[in-house]
Image (spheres, rainbow, N blue to C red):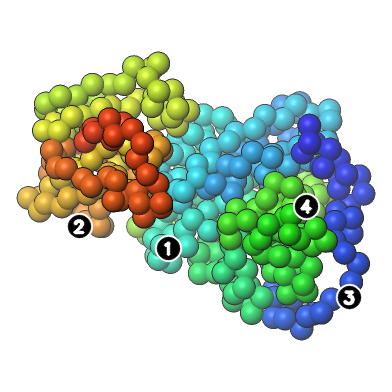
Amino acid sequence: MKHSILLLLFFLTGILFGLSLPAQECRNKKAPVFKMQEFHQRDGLPNVFHKIASQRQVRIGYIGGSITEATEGWRDLTFSWFRLKFPQTAFYQVNASIGGTGSNLGVFRMEHDVFIGKPDLLFVEFAINDAGDTRENILKSMEGLIRKTWAAFPNTDICFVYTTAEQVCIDLVNGKLHPASKAMEELAEYYGIPSIHVGIEIARMYSQGRLVLSGAPSENEHTIVFTEDHTHPLSESGHPLYANIVVKYLDKMSKKDYTANHELPVPYVPDNWQYAKMIDVSQTERIGNWTILAEDSPIAQQFKQFMPSIYQAKPGAMMLFKFKGRVLGIYDCIGPGTGTIEITIDRKKEEISRFDPWCNNYRKHYFFVKELEDKVHEVEIRVLDKKIDKALTLLQRKITITDPSKYEGLDWYPANVMIVGELQK
């Protein structure tokens, strides 16, 4: 209800900034960020607005990280805008966002998490979570995401949204576009995808002294506080600003509606991840103590939306499979009762810990091994009976173990094997 009222205000008045900000002169209009373009319409969003005008049911999809996952955030606010702007249409939301994940996992999740909802419009927000990756890797995963979508649903419109964080915002003030956003803009330009950089307006407001990037709202009663943790916008202030920017350009694009198939040109990156596949654990050979988690188990209940099948492997258990391709990853759960695995690819061994300083609770996680040669690979994964100083690990985040029995397990909880290539018999 709260976010609907917020949306109604800026939908009817269009003056959210004027209502929310102190009246003062701009103090830094010469900052390079004022020369940056926050919106590129390109081919726009023709199909979704045509469908809104001609049909009664429309599905809006979102895929991204924690900024998009947040309840009462820009996702919910923009979805409410559609409902308020077009009250004669029934809208359904497809929320495929997972905190702490990037486009390299997102491209593998498309079939199960996004396509199942058959979205007419898909918002993609991965710029912040892709920050630590290379341009080459971002191009591969993001182009794979685009090509998968339009190969399956050529009438689905796509819109890129670039969010920000404190350091990214400071760079924007100086006119420096984030490398992840720059890589995504290459693809947006090539495929005609509209993009909205919601961080540019935040950087402008910050440069003018009209917004605090990170702080306590109680200590800044007369200034907008964007975040408390340098990254995640506050639902009372940061997210409405994001949403207002997005709906401003959605409204602009809504003036033009027609139908147009999104045809796939020659790939921008020849080795993109269009053929990324999630392989269920059941398709591999398993040796030792393996069980599939019951539907009523706490871990299965917590992650059933995105992980319909989760397996538990005890120390000594092994997984064996072959695949032809160059990319291999694992989609799993980690938490208090997880330990270490040893992965052997073509007889080369590597230990990978499935316990980290955030493992006081269970969460969805994933990892990739380094890129391989494009050939047939033999893979063996073994769960090790290797003790971990979990108390010391958690102390990195000042977390003290109060129930040692909760942390005794050294198990592994895989849901899927991820490959770009083909599983071999």
Q: Residues within 10 Å of mark 2 (few under 14, many from 20)?
A: few
**Residue 251 sits above or below residue 171 on the image:** above
Mark 1 or 3 closer to N-term?
3
Give the number of the mark in front: 2 or 1: 1
Front in this rendered view, residue 165 or 155 = 165
**Which residue carries the number 2 mark?**
373
Q: Residues within 10 Å of mark 1 (few under 14, many from 20)?
A: few
Q: Residues within 10 Å of mark 4 (few under 14, many from 20)?
A: many
Front in this rendered view, residue 352 or 86 = 352
Query: What is the CA distance from the residue labelled 2 to the residue labelled 1?
Result: 23 Å
Give the number of the mark in front: 4 or 3: 3
**Which residue carries the number 4 mark?**
244
Residue 346 in the figure: left or right of residue 418: left
Query: What is the CA distance from the residue labelled 4 to the residue labelled 3?
Result: 21 Å
Q: Quadrant of residue 259?
A: top right
Q: Amino acid at mark 2?
A: Glu
Assign a secondary structure to mark 1.
Answer: loop
**Is residue 313 visible in this depiction of the protein?**
yes
Q: Amino acid at mark 4?
A: Asn
Residue 332 x/y as whole percent: 33, 37
Q: Quadrant of residue 215?
A: bottom right
Give the number of the mark in front: 1 or 3: 3
**Which residue carries the number 1 mark?**
132
Circle number at residue 25: 3
